Image (tube, grey):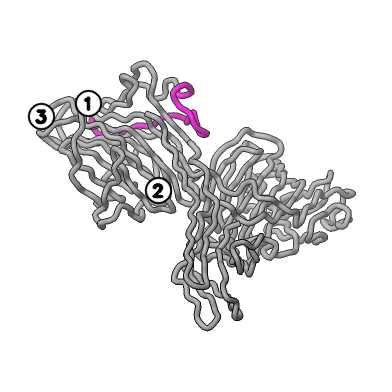
Amino acid sequence: MKTKTQTMKKLRSLAFAGLLALVGVGSAPAQNQILLTDTFDTPDTFNLNDNLATRESGVLAPVPGYISRQQGLNDVIQITNNILTLTRLDNGGQYISAVSPDVNFFAYEVNQSFHVECDVSTTATNASDTWAALTVRGVSPTMFAVRENCFSVFVRSRGRYTILDGNVNVANFPLATNVGNLYNIIIDVQTNVASVTIDGIPRLFANGTYSYVITNAIYGNYVSFCSFANSNVISLPAIATFNNLVVSVPQIPGLDLPASVVLADNFTTTNSASLNDNLPTRQSGTAATQTWVSAQTNGADFAISSDSLSITNTGDTSTNASFGTAFPNLDLRPYERFGCFHVSVAVSPVVGAGDSWGAVKVRQSDPTQWILSGDGFGVFVRPNGSWGITDGGNVKFTGFITPAATYLVDIEVITNMAYVKINGAPVHLGYALSSTQAMNYVSLMSNAGVGSAGVSATFTNFEFDALGTYAGLPAPSLLNTTSTAGTFSSQFSSAANAAYTLEYKNNLTDPAWTALYNIIGTGGTLTVTNVTAGTAQRFYRLHVP
């Protein structure tokens, strides 16, 4: 089966009504980025993890492995004939089996969007109900469809498809049976709105539409293969198969946006207990020079040492953690361009004993706060290569990279979506910040957990950049257009924090469009106006840079 990619064409609309011609202009996002494919092409085996490197592809391949669970002792899970096969051997009860690749795809969604495809079959028998289900958005691996918090598409031996959101039935309609009850299932989720295609045909939901807003499964994204056989199965064995898995996400938008340095500090100065020696020579950017301010809880010393900013935790950590933070004394929010910015810094966490980490945190209103308090978005790294991502007071994602003495942390925020790299490796490909703070204080932090004697963290090559306007949005369409008493008015559906420009020409043959003003999207419907001042005709367009 060939993998499928999705593309969106540029959307353009042109309306001419007396004085007005209205144009929406945008950039089409690129095709989806493949995270994982699995053909299950390997010799027959009960070990689901055989030959992962040869049968899998995608940026996450090979996965750490597959996890399975089953309720019936006589259920068999194996790869046979290059297909993942879940088999029920007896009819002693109603049992479910499930298998999952051990990876949470939630961290890799872009704008709550992803795409999963798989070939699924279930035993063809009219004696009883059996089904196979493709499950996404599981909060943990091996979700049992119908019983747990996930979004599932079932195909049934009796010729029906069923869709569940958690344990809520949101679709249950007839489905033409195929030879062997083999179906190609596609679950496509765009900004948390799901559509389902089976054998190339869009499938209806109970609400009478072909799309459904997922409500019960929004905290994780483990993909599972599930099977079920009723207790009165007559035709045994009852078999479900799964093959040709494809998991993909939209390409990361905007990572090539032009950047301009707002504030960079290489900390190159003579060793000093002051953080603010020689600022004019060591700092650069449109906002240079800026003083650094520090704050601490339970003891921390701050200094410039070996051309680095050093935070050493000095408190008694026998019973309490020690925390220190340093930050430029400047709200950087006004330097963002339509909610877009980039922060990078090299972090070297050092620990003598116990737990410690170094961190950078952005979009804060109070930079004196600990990484798990207040607001803002943070990334912390430990000497052993473990990392974590926080939003407000909560740890959202964790993982491991190759341990190193120094970790280059990159945080890029594009219209309120955060993208994180550590030492050049993407660890998170798009997360919608829960807080769209009107401030953006950026801080560098060192933490010593209880018992962490001799802890410090150093930071070098700090930089905050403003980014160009976002270029991955679909074209807007101007609607409900009027021209009354010399005033043009029109509406459009906006994307939150995205940049739009209203432009005009008095004649389409004019060599260039004239920009009137920029609009920052709210996620709702906005109105644009312009006084034409007796101009005989004027053509308008809403432009996405």
Which amino acid type is marked by label 3?
Ile
Tell me which residue sits at (40%, 30%) in the image.
2
Relative height, residue 427 to residue 69 (above, below): below
Q: Residue at x 44, y 45 (%)?
A: 114
Counting the numbered discs, the total is: 3
Amino acid type of the residue that numbered disc 2 sits on in the rendered structure: Val
Residue that numbered label 1 is attached to:
74
Tell me where residue 491 appears, x and y as whole percent: 48, 70
Residue 40 position by quadrant: top left
Say whether residue 461 is visible.
yes
Q: Is 300 situated left or right of 246 in this image?
A: right
Which structural element holds mark 3?
A: loop
Circle 3 sits on which residue? 234
Left or right: 479 as drawn, with respect to 297: left
| Mark whose residue sits in front, 3 or 1 | 3
Quadrant showing the N terminus: top left
